[in-house]
Amino acid sequence: MNLAALQENVSAETTTVPRRERGALVRLLTCGSVDDGKSTLIGRLLWDAAGVTEDQRAAVTLASHNRAVNGERIDFSLLLDGLQAEREQGITIDIAWRYFETPDRRFIIIDSPGHEQYTRNMATGASHADIAILLVDARHGAKRQTRRHAAICDLVGIRRVVLAVNKMDAVNWSEARYREIEADFRAMAGSFNFAQVTIIPVAALTGDNVAYRSTTMPWYAGPTLLDYLEAVDPEAVQVDAPFRMPVQLVLRAAGDFRGYAGTVTSGRIGIGERIVDARSGLGATLRRIATMDGDRAFASKGDAVTLVLDTDLDISRGAVLSEVPRRPTNADVIEARLVWLSETPFDPEAGYLLRTATDLTPVTSMSVSALVDFETLASQPAHACGVNDIADCRILLGRPAAIDLFRDLPLTGSFVLVSAIDGATVAGGVISWAQAGAPAVGDNVLVLDRALLARGICSDLGDSPADLAEFNRRAQEVAVLLRSVGVPVLIEI
Amino acid sequence: MTALTSHLKLLEAESIHIFREAAAQFRSPVLLYSIGKDSTVLLHLARKAFWPAKPPFPLLHVDTTWKFRDMIAFRDKTARELGLDLIVHTNHDGLARNINPFDHPPSVYTDVMKTVALRQALDAGGFDAAFGGARRDEEASRAKERVFSFRAAGHRWEPRRQRPEMWQLLNGRLGKGETVRVFPLSNWTEGDVWRYIALEKLDVVPLYFAAERPVVTRNGQLIVVDDERMRLEPGEKPVLRKVRFRTLGCWPLTAAIESEAADIDEVVEETLAAKYSERAGRLIDHDQAGAMEMKKREGYF
C-alpha cells in the first residue's frame, strides 16, 4: 500500500479522525524569558529521550568541557544553539527546529529565543506550534518577557500551555515556592483563551521531571514533561467546520485540463457538491478532485489537491473556494490584533499590503487603537506601535478580500502585513471582526471628506502627526458605523 | 498503518503547499537537483504539486566532475524519463585551475566547485528562487533556517536578519537584489525520507544499497574508489567490502558505511536504528567549526 492508499483510508473515515492519527505529529514551542533555560531543557529532553546521535553527543561533550559553564556537566544548550554567534555569546538568536519520535508520535520542537530583541523570531516559532512550554526560573517567577511570550502564544492561537517551573534545584526543591508561582500563573492565564494549562516543576540541568520522575520532589504527583507530551491531544478537532480552500494556482494541462490547486484549510468537500467563490459570488459544482495518485472522492482539511469544476469561474490565485451556506465575509474593513515585527515602527503614511491565505490586498488606511500592557496584560488606548508590541488595529482594504474570523477558522482568519516598499513582513495578526462595505460609486454614496469631518467630529484636531492619525481613525470609525446600518461610504481625506 | 507513517501524509501536503506558493510568487524558479535521496523526494513532490502539468521550472545540477558515475547515469535517466529540462553547470574556471579534492582542502574545493559554481549558475539563469532538498534535522545551522530563506545580493545568508514566517503564510516579496532558497523538505527527517521512498516505491541511486565495492580506509573513514583518479598512498590497496552510502556527494569526500542493507526495507530499518547522524560521513562539514554556516553565508545552498 502506498501513501495515496493510506490517505484514501483516512478520508473514508469522515471527520472523526482517530486519536492516533491526529496525534501523529505534534509541534511544540519552548518560550519564556532569557536565561530561564529553554535550550537546556530541550537539550536535556532530547538527550534523555534518545533524540541525539553518538557523534552529536561526542561533539557536545567536548564543547562543554571547553566552555565548562556548568563545571564538569554537559551543556545541553549546545544541542540547540546552532549559529556561531549564539555559541559565542551563549544566547539563542533565532528559533531552532529539532525532531524526535517516540513509538507513537513524531515531535517537532521549536526552541525560541528569550531576548526581547528577537521577539519576532519567537512569534514565527509560536505560529507553527500546537502546544507551548513556557519556562520560568523558580527563583524569579514570571517576568515581563514571560508575559509577552504568553500573550503572543495566545494571539497566534495556541490553546495548550505547559508552565515549566525550571531550576527547582536552585530553590531547594521547595514546594512552597512552586505553589506561589503556580497561583501567580493561574491568575495571569485568566487573561488568555488557553483551553488547558499544566504546571510542572522541573530541573533541566539534572533532568528531574523532564524524561524521568524526580525523587527530590515527592510532593508533585503530576506527569513528567515527557509523559505529558506523549499523552496530550494536540488539536481540538473542529467537527463540521465549513469547507475552505484558498486557491494557490490555476493549473492548466493537455486535454483542456483546468484545475484550482490549493490546500484545504478547513472542512471537507466531495464530488458533486456546490462550491462558491466568496469574492465574486460565482458558484459551480465540483467535478473532480485530481491528484497524481488518482482522483479522489473527498478532500478534507490538510489535503493538498487540485479541484476541477463543471464551469469556468474565471478566478485566480487569492480566491477562496467555499461551501455555499457558510461563506467567508467579502470584507474591505477588518479589525485585528497583531504583533509588530519590524524594527521600523508603524507609520500611517507608509504603504502596506495585507497577505491573507493566498491573497495580497493593498491597504488603503490603517489605524492603531490600543496596545497590550505587558505589566498588567490590559489594553491601553494608543495610536502608535513599534517592534514587539501587541496592538489592536483597524485596516481598510483597497478592494474586498475573502476573510474569516480567526477564532472560527484560523487559517483563513490570519494575515501578515507586508511593506509595499521592500517586501518585508512587518507584522502578523489575527482577524477579530470583518465587514463587507464596498460601496459601488454611484448616486447614493456618502463621501466623507476632510472639510466635512473638520467641521465637527474632528474640530479639536490640529496638524501634528498624532492628530492626523486620530483624524484618520475617527474617519474610519464613522465610516464603519454608517456602513453597519447600510449607508455606502467613501473616505476621501 | 502506524502513527509514524500517517505523519508522512501531513509532511507531503506541507511540501506540496510550499512548492505551489513559490511557483505562484517567484518569476523564475529552478530546482537544485543533486541526485541523492532528498532530491529524489523533492522532485517527486514537485511532480505531485503541479500534476497533471509538469513542474514549471527546470532542474539544475552543479557538477563538480567528481560525482559517482552511478549518480550521473541516474540523473540523466531521470531527466529523460520524466521529460524535464536539466541544466548541468560546472565551474570551468575552477576546472582550468585544476581545483580538486586531493590537492586542495575541502573548504577550498567546496567553495570553488560547489558554492561559486552554484552562484554562477543561478546568476547565468537569472533565477530568483531555487528549491533545495535541505532538511532542518541535518545540521545545526540548517535547524535555524526558514522555508523561504532570503539571500542578500551575492547570495549571502544573513542568519541574524531572517524574515519572520508566520502560520502557512509564505511572503515571497523580494527586495532589491534579493533571491530566495526554498526548502520544501524543511520538516522532514532522514527517517521520513527513507520511509517515504519505501511507501512511494521511488527509484534511488544504487549506491544507497549495500554491495561489494573497492574501499580504502583513511582516518577511520571508508572511501570507495570510483574511478582511476584516486590517489593511493604508499601501501594503500583497495579491498572489496560490503558497504553503502547514507549520503551522496563527491566520491573522494563521501564516506561509506559497512552495511548489509541491500534493499529499501533494510535501509529504512537501519536508518531508524542509526546511532550516528548522516553528516558524520560528510568530510566537508568537519573541516572547521561552524563549517556549514560559513558556507551558507557565502552562498552555498
Image (cartoon, rainbow, N blue to C red):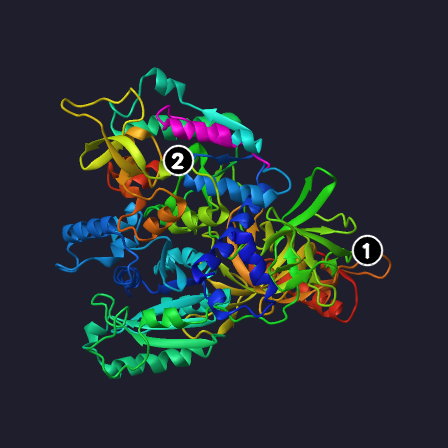
Q: Relative to residue A229, is residue B158 depicted above or below?
A: above
Q: Secondary structure at mark 2?
A: helix
Tell whether label 1 touches label 2 (CB within 8 Å): no
Q: Quadrant of the C terminus of chain A?
A: bottom right
Please state the horizontal and vertical placement of residue A435, each as a whole percent of the image.
69, 65
- The residue sitting at 77% across, 56% down in the picture is A284
Name the mark on residue B206.
Answer: 2
Q: Is residue B64 magenta?
A: yes
Name the residue located 46 percent from the left edge and 62 percent from the top edge: A389
* Tag 2: amino acid: Pro
Q: Return the residue nearer the eye: A73 or A176.
A: A73
The quadrant where residue A100 appears: bottom left
Tell me if B258 is positioned left or right of B171 in this view: left
**Residue B19 location (% of width, % of height):** 54, 45
In this rendering, does residue A109 appear at all? yes
Q: Position of residue A58 (x, y in %)?
A: 20, 50
List the residue tagged with mark 1: A441
